Image (spheres, grey):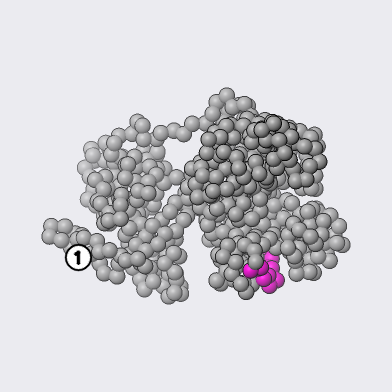
Amino acid sequence: MTDRYALERTEPDVDSSQDYELLLGYENGTHTVIRFRRRYDTCDPHDFRITNDTMRMLYAYHTDDPASRPGSKLGPLSYHGPIQRGFRSLYLMERVNLEEPLPSDLLVWDLRNPVVTLPASEDTLYWCKIFKLPSVKRKHHMIKYEPLREPGNRAYVHHVIVYECQGSEAEFEVHAKERGQVCYQSPMPPIFFNCNNVVIAWGIGSEGFSFPPEAGYPLDPDLGPKYFMMETHYNNPTQDADVTDTSGIRVYYTASLRRHDAGVLSVGLDPNWRHIIPPGQPEVVSEGHCISACTQQTVPPQGIYIFGVALHTHLIGRKVRLRQIRDGVEYTPITTDNNYDFSYQEYRRLQNPVKVYPGDHLIAQCVYNSEGRTTITLGGLTTREEMCLVFAMYYPRIDLSLCHSLPSLPTVLHSLGIQELWPGSNPVRIKSPPELADMTLESRLVTYDWENQFRSFQEATRKGSFKPLCWMKKPTLLPGTENFEAYYPNITKPYEDIDTCHNRRSKPHRRKKPGEAQMESGDRASVGASEEDSANFVGGEDEDKTKVYSSISLQESSRLNSSSRSTSTLDLLVFVLAYCILLAFRR
């Protein structure tokens, strides 16, 4: 095994700093498994830092082993060809463990759509279906959920969100017996808009979520809702005909209650045309606010703990983070992804839950790359439009459901150089300044000089006022915020990333491989790993734990051998990285 890097489309070069340590490796009929470790940050310019970002794991393989060359263990690497290669996005640090032990009294509830036909004339379909809580006599906890997908339809299902419903049980009972209908347009019943408290948020690429052992989502027939709405977003960009689907969500729940009731808080920009993303820009920053007034009135004095997050944008989202400000001081972001992948919207289980106190101001910050677009992109529900949302799982549960914001109309107009609109005009027309008089708002959006006015637009958007939307479970706006107008918080001490390599020696010491000769006692004392070193390794903490990997490999081998021989190459990446994936790649 060698540490290599590639700067162009040639055989990767051997890195002068060998930072990967092989722990074990084996092959069977379907898989090649390699277990290794290295520092999260090697400070090697030819290595990628391993962070909370979405990682693109590249792999390539050849049917023949490399021939050895004289005086070397490994000869030239033969080109793998155009087919025997690929990639997969995944998290290396905040992954959800879907194989945690489950209680013996586990129950299953399937929320599945009837046969839904995707319209060939449109690229987006939102389908809403009402479900009734299973017949349980007392409170239960949802502790895990996973997607139910039809084979061959993965590309069409973009996301699924399950909401609690409030309102007339008799009316919801009628709708629960129906097959569902298109969301957010006529003839959708008005009562469907009473379903707004998020229970489950699943996105494309996710395999589901497993709650930590101290928390579960309450399913309570006495004090909680009895009806739920499942919203399924179908994406059909090529407008394929005759596509039908019955996807949904499988919920696992138990009567063995956990210590805390969990909830989901949505933070970000309300999907609306006022969210404007100019074309042709490498970086456009949009921010949705959960203002301090919202958390001040809804978060208990002892605070809440955020233990999981899911980030959500559409096609041109590139970076997302959830920021936290308290008394003018910006703390370490609750989560950050500087390498966001639209096709991999998995929940993160935070390594350490983050506490949010009353009065904290939260900001969902999204960065978009619109270089490939020649017209503006607006906020909205379709895949071509954009979103900026963060779904935060937390405990204990509070009444706040959606904590969004929306740029105020004066802010939008000011960012476009508009002073006043003609009252009651349809279509909306500009009254002043004189040079824009009688131009429609739509024309101004389309013809605006984004290339030269982009910076002033961003500045006006950031400094302008916005409308906070603090939605409770009822659903009603938080009293006192209905007519509130807010501004960007005053941050006296912004957060700054720390350069972990600044004071570190140029070549970090390498951990011993299992089986290597023991060093002399004096050498061991001089290069022993510190606690910080141990925490900065991927793959293992000490030699005692390394010895366990042999038994782990046998368990993996047994399970993998019993799996289908047709397992796809992408599925192998959960356990295996073929030789090129072990290399550090430069973009």
Circle 1 Cα neighbour tier, 10 Å, few/some/many (<14 / 14–19 / ≥20): few
Residue at (73, 59) in percent of width and height: 183
Write down the quadrant of residue 250 in the picture.
Answer: bottom right
Q: Where is residue 121 in the image (x, y as percent from the top left)?
A: 65, 66
* Residue segment shown in magenta: 107-120
Residue situated in front as seen by the camera: 140 or 487: 487
Q: Is residue 113 located in the magenta-colored stretch of the structure?
A: yes
In the rendered structure, the answer to whether residue 64 lies left or right of residue 156 reads left
Q: Which residue is drawn at 53% across and 57% down?
A: 343
Residue 130, x across and y down, in percent: 76, 63
Residue farthest along the left direction in this orientation:
70
Residue 351 spot, x, y in % from top left: 52, 45
Q: Which residue is drawn at 69% across and 66% down?
A: 111
Which residue appears farthest toward the top when viewing the image? 492
**Residue 518: within the magenta?**
no
In the rendered structure, the answer to whether residue 4 lies left or right of residue 482 reads left
User: Considering depth in this image, is 392 or 494 the residue closer to the camera?
Assistant: 494
Q: Is residue 211 left or right of residue 56?
A: right
Relative to residue 445, is residue 578 drawn left or right? left
Provide the secondary structure element on which disc 1 rests: loop
Majority SS type along the magenta span: strand
**Residue 333 seen by the camera:** no
The residue singled out by tag 1 in the image is 67
Would residue 179 be seen by someone viewing this image from the given angle?
Answer: yes
Residue in the image at 64% along x and 36% along y? 416
Quarter-of-image position of residue 407: top right
Quadrant position of the N terminus in the picture: bottom left
Residue 285 image position (x, y, % from top left)? 56, 39
- The amino acid pointed to by label 1 is Ala
Q: Looking at the image, how many numbered discs can be counted on the residues?
A: 1
